[in-house]
Amino acid sequence: MQKKNIEIWVGVFVAAGIAALVMLAMKVSNLAAFTSRDGYDVIAHFENIGGLKERAAVTVAGVRIGRVKSIVFDDKTYEAVVTMHIDAAQNRLPLDTSASILTAGLLGEQYVSLEPGGDEKFLKQGDQIKLTQSAIILEKMVGQFLFSKAAGEGKKDEGTAP
Amino acid sequence: MMDWLQRLGHSSLGVFERLGRGNLFLLRVLAAVPSLVLRPRLVIAQLYSVGVLSMTLILISGLNVGMVLGLQGYNTLVDFGAEESLGQVVALSLVRELGPVVAALLFAGRAGSALTAEIGLMKATEQLSGMEMMAVDPVKRVIAPRFLAGIFSMPLLAAIFSAVGVLGGFFVGVGLLGVDSGAFWSQMQAKVDLQDDILNGVIKSLVFGWVAAWIAVYEGYDAVPTTEGVSRATTRTVVHTAFAVLGLDFILTALMFGND
Amino acid sequence: MSLNNDDPLIVKIRGVKFTYGVRTIFDNVDIDIPRGKITAIMGPSGTGKTTLLRLIGGQLRPDAGSIEVDGQNVHAVSRDALFQLRKRMSLLFQTGALFTDLTVFENVAFPLREHTRLPESMIRDLVLMKLQAVGLRGARDLLPAELSGGMARRVALARAIALDPMMIMYDEPFTGQDPITVGVIMQLIRMLNDTLGLTSIIVSHDVHELTMICDRMYMIAEGKVMGHGSPEEMKGSASGWVRQFMGGLPDGPVPFHYPAPDYAEDLLAGASRT
């Protein structure tokens, strides 16, 4: 009788442990990430990637379809080469899709947004996305803004001087 | 000065000797593990005293830690208007660090010390010796089942700790502080990776379970067979396990999440 | 078991030397244990009587000399052979060494469960038989913590005979027991020895009890055998050691005084210091 009770309790313990593991896998993590292990890689060259990190999201129309796999620097073109891993299910991205690096919110993480083009052919393993738009660097923008403002006022001064 | 050096040398030699004996002992235990396949009941009985009896402590602690994380995380995040990320903060802290580490520390205090005391007392009362004289190998009959039960229990206890902790964080964040329930879960799911976070957490707890169970059974088996010797061995189990777990955690974290 | 071997000696100890750290426990000890008899090994406290039993059981290894049990050299055979040998000899520890987490029944069943594949019903019968032999069949559901010291020893005895060994070694079976329990244990040792055809070795310093039940006696002191023979021979022994021990005399070869400088000189040394 006692032996039976012990076994029941051990059963409860093991079941609870496994249930906890399953909950962590299903509810807490993105189980989808596991299936996305098969898929295909595409690359894109960017002049500047800003703060983009590996494992950042790759989205189309705001929906995550993959992750940034690696970021390396190409010392011939002086550009960043970003390899993106796209889920196998998303195999109908046109060849002339464009990629841009955007920021989620003002201070959020940076991610790659893909904009589908109109080509009949689709991207496949190893293809390169030709049209890219670099990350928007806040400092540069502020700098440009101030510069154009200053330049504009300079013109105004010129105009009124004579 | 010479005196001091000699003492240093003496104690380091002592440490190495203990380490060596501990490793030899581990080999004996591992050699005995296959024989347990024929007698799973021995392991089940130990799973009860190692796992089931630790469950209450793990459940309560996990819930508490999760609730505190929810509260503190919210207070910090709300300043940045990022309270939606609460789920992510709570889940990542638990799954990566607090689950495996705190569960291992609690395990050492609850189950590890009990294992050491039990084995040490069996040695002190000549039960182990008696077993040997009955042609039964105590390493096979007494030590190996406890070691295996420890390794097996640890990931389960850590998972229960993390899962209950996430629920505790959810309860405080969503239930009391008004974080949006959908955002709580979706932010969590977006950032917690099955392989990088959850699997690594499970690996961590397996390593911790291995170390905690090893220390516990070794200290018991190596205890001086007197009342005082057993009580010292019990203390050593808790202290050494805590050091080992914290040290290993740093190394494992650096290896797993270091290049992120 | 004893039938298939004609050698009248079951244990032969030859020239055994054993040191523990810097202390010499045994120095060139020869002991013969005759088959089917009760042999007592006596000696003052701290002479390593328990150590001798552990040497016979193969838990300790002598520095020199050999120990043969039933024709096999305990320290030369393989581990498996040693375990096979141990199944045929039991050691009854001073404390009983019962498993504290198991009931009396399970304690006695332990060797059977470990070493045999008998069905549960047969194990039950065997256990009850052994418990009946020591008079504790009614105590089968108690835990060791609920037993008196004498009962714990009887349970340990039942466990020791569970596998029908050829030899039982008793480590201080009478120590700390009341006279009734001592009487019960004495009777059990004699009865089990004769009815089961066992060989018994008793390590003790209770001379009175030993002379009543044993067939042969060995007296060990200072690492050596000081005398041996039947109880009658021992009583009439010429050895000062044996006479002091058998008679319980306060002074003799075992000195009353711990080694010290001369008494008078010691006192005078104190006086001259002031």
Image (spheres, helix red, strand yellow):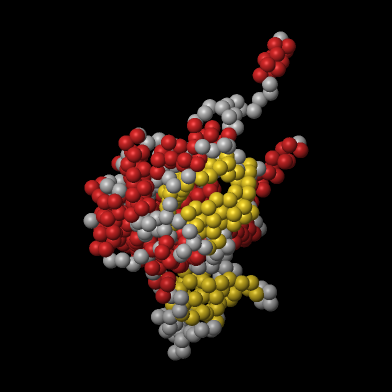
Provide residue A104's location: percent of width, then percent of height: 46, 63
**Left or right: where does residue B173 sit relative to residue C216?**
left
Quadrant of the frame with the N terminus of chain C:
bottom left
**Left or right: where does residue A75 sit relative to residue B42?**
right
Taking depth in this image into account, of C11 and B158 the one nearest to the observer is: C11
Whether residue B75 is situated above or below residue A31 in the rendered picture? above
**Left or right: where does residue C158 sit relative to residue B214?**
left
Whether residue B154 is situated above or below residue B39 in the rendered picture? above
**Residue at x-position 49% and y-position 76%:** A85
**Residue at x-position 40% and y-position 35%:** C176
**Left or right: where does residue C244 sit relative to residue A161?**
left
Whether residue B133 is situated above or below residue C176 in the rendered picture? below
Query: Does the rendering let one see residue A136?
Result: no
Whether residue C80 is situated above or below residue A90 in the rendered picture? above
Taking depth in this image into account, of B156 and B200 the one nearest to the observer is: B156
Query: Does the rendering let one see residue C4?
Result: yes
